Amino acid sequence: MKPSRSEFISIRGLQTHVRHWGDETAPILVMVHGWMDVSASFQFVVDCLQKEWHVIAPDWRGFGLTETPKTDTYWFPEYLADLDAILEHYQPDVPVNLLGHSMGGNVASIYAGVRPERISKLINLEGFGMPLTHPKQAPGRYRKWLDELRTTPTMRIYASQTEVAGRLQKTNPRLSDERAAFLSQHWARENAQGQWEILGDPAHKNSSPLLYRVEEIMACWQKITAPVLWVEANDTDVWRWMGPKEEARVEINKRIAFIPVVQTEMIMDAGHMLHHDQPEILAKLVEDFLLN
C-alpha cells in the first residue's frame, strides 16, 4: 500500500484531519468521502493510480479523526463552507481537480457550480443527490426532526476490530478480508474498555428538517464549467433511497442532463462503494479523464 500521512488543520474553528498521499510537489487531486465514511476509504484507488499525484483527502466534520462540532444537527451547507476553506488552504490560486463519492459527490458538484472558477475537473462517484421532495412533506419532516431531538442518538459498539470488519463486509459482501481489516482500523477505534467505537458522530443519523430542493441543486449543477466525469456502479443500491429503479433511473438521467460537459461511465461488478470493489478500473478512468 502507498503510505499516507496525517495532518490536522483548523477549518472554521474545527481541528480537521487531512490525509495525504504522494509527493507534495505533484499535481493535487482532492478526494472527499461519503456519509459515514472516512478519508482512508480512498486507499485502494490511490494504490492503483499510475501517475504521481498529491492526493489530499479530508475527514468531514464529525467523521474520522476530524473534530465533532457541538451540534445536534448537521446542516448541508456547512460541508460546502468546509470544502471552500480546505481548497483555499491548500491551493488558493489555481483551480483544483476534485473527486467526491456519494455525499461527497453531492457536495463537490454543488460547490463546482457555486464556485466554478475553483474547479479544473470534477469526478462524481455515485453522487446522485437525494429523492425528490414536495412542500407538503415539510410539516412531517419538521415534526420528525423535533421528535428525534428529544433523544440522544447512539452508535453500535463492537467487541473487536474483527466485528467491525464483519460489519463492513455485511454492508458490502464484495469487500475482501484484507480490505475489510484495513478499513476497520480507520472506520472505528478501540476505547478504554477494549471495545470498538465508530468514528462518526451519532448526530449524523438525525434527519434534516429541510427538504431537498432539486430545482435549487440543479441550478447549481447547471453553472458547472469544469468537465465532469460521472461514474456509477452497475450493482448500486441507490434505489433504497431514490425510489423504484425505473423511476429513479429517469430522475437521475434528468439530473445528469443539467451538467454542461459530462462523460458518463458504468463500472461493472461493483456496488455503491465502487472505489472498494473495482479500484483498478476506477483509477484508470480517473487518470484517463484527468490527463486527456
Image: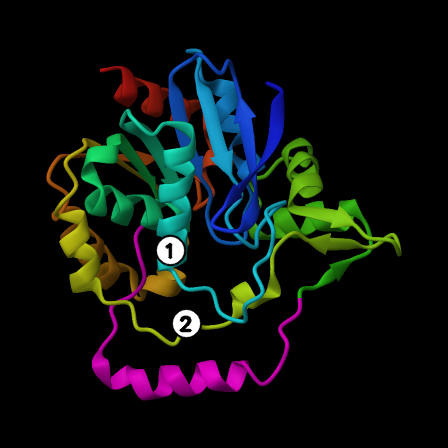
Of residues 247 and 217, the one drawn nearer to the viewer in this rendering: 217
* Kind of residue sitting beneath label 2: Ser
**180 part of magenta stretch:** no
In the image, residue 169 sits, relative to residue 202, either above or below, namely above
Residue underneath mark 1: 238
How would you rate the neighbour count of disc 2 (Cα within 10 Å): few for under 14, some for 14-19, many for 20 or more? some
Label of residue 208 in the image: 2
Question: Is tag 1's residue or tag 2's residue first in the polypeptide sequence?
Answer: 2
The residue positioned 30% from the left and 83% from the top of the image is: 138
* Kind of residue sitting beneath label 1: Val
Of residues 254 and 208, the one drawn nearer to the viewer in this rendering: 208
Q: Position of residue 130 (x, y in %)?
A: 32, 62
Residue 126 in view in this figure? no
In the image, residue 8 sits, relative to residue 189, either above or below, namely above
For the magenta stretch, what is the residue range? 127-154
The residue positioned 54% from the left and 35% from the top of the image is: 18
The quadrant of the rendering that contains the C terminus is top left
Of residues 31 and 245, the one drawn nearer to the viewer in this rendering: 31
Q: Is residue 183 left or right of residue 52?
A: right
Report the mark closest to the observer, 1 or 2: 2
Label pair 1/2, CB-CB below 8 angstroms: no
The residue positioned 37% from the left and 81% from the top of the image is: 141
Residue 92 in view in this figure? yes
Q: Is residue 81 left or right of residue 60?
A: left
Cα–Cα span, label 1 and label 2? 19 Å
The residue positioned 38% from the left and 16% from the top of the image is: 27
